[in-house]
Amino acid sequence: MTHEIAGDERPWILLRGLGREARHWGEFPQILRDTLHGAKVLAPDLPGNGLRWREASAGSIAGQCDSLRAALADVLAQGAVNVLAISLGGMVAIDWAHRYPQEVARLALVNTSLAGVAPFWRRLCWRNYPALLRLPLHGTAAREQCILQLTSNLPARRAAALPHWLAWQREAPVSRGNLLRQLYAAGSYRAPMQWPACPALILASEQDRLVDPYCSVRLARLTGWPIALHPEAGHDMPLDDPQWLARQIAQWCK
């Protein structure tokens, strides 16, 4: 017999994006815990990243979702969870809530995009195509600097994060093969025929230079889900303004 978790006690599952791991959330998990008055916050890694860097990334979003659910079996045995996900993690979260609706109570999506919702040149801003195509060819230092430049709009935040990002990649390197499999999974995933029925919130950065905020605005129009726009943050909103992100979640949950 399982113990069903009360709504206000459900853990938050945080999912990062392409080639990122739990540590890339930085201070955000603690800020979210504090803002939600001690809520349980978990940041599992998708296969191929972080603690799971030796594993092969699934070549599909569904495969990544199923691997994640298997890793969270003990948590899910206690009841549904809330999910906050950014970018590629948002695709995994939508797939999860669509195929296993009994497992996802709330869904918050940050700067994500879906084929079938927005054209490819908006899903990845066309000006960045040369830099993105070179990513799998770069060494660790050049790749992390490039990712930071594309995803953060705040020079001070980028400078503070870079030494940590480089150290994490040395400790848990994302292989070129895994990066390519994750890119393929993200590029080939399409919006489900039916949107998840759970409460959902869309959060987007108006100054996102990697994914056009049009993708989030269009998703909000199609689904009727509420949307909040940050006026200055880059694609990596948890890095550029974690306090704003946590406040939006807390206000939505009231």
Image (spheres, helix red, strand yellow):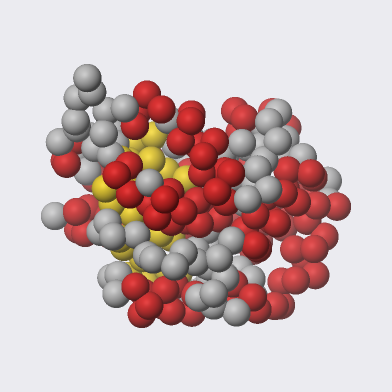
Q: In which quarter of the image is residue 63?
A: top right
Q: Is residue 233 left or right of residue 180?
A: left
Relative image position of residue 18 (x, y in whole percent): 62, 51
Q: In which quarter of the image is the N terminus?
A: top left
Residue 226 % position (x, y): 28, 70
Q: Which residue is drawn at 67% across and 40% down?
A: 57
**At which x and y percent is residue 141?**
77, 45
Residue 190, image quadrant:
bottom right
Residue under the image location 69 percent in, 56 percent down = 183
> Which of the pair 151/59 is nearer the observer?
59
Q: In this view, does 51 lie above or below 199?
A: above
Location of residue 234 with respect to 140 vertically, above or below: below
Q: Is residue 171 visible?
A: yes
Is residue 166 at least partly visible in the picture? Answer: no
- Point 80% across, 63% down: residue: 133
Q: In which quarter of the image is the C terminus?
A: bottom left
| Left or right: 231, with 55 as reference point | left
How many marks on residues? 0
Looking at the image, which is closer to me, 242 or 204? 204
When the figure is inspected, residue 147 is found, relative to residue 228, above or below; the finding is: above
Residue at (54, 36) in percent of width and height:
67
Q: Where is residue 82 drawn, in percent x and y?
A: 31, 45
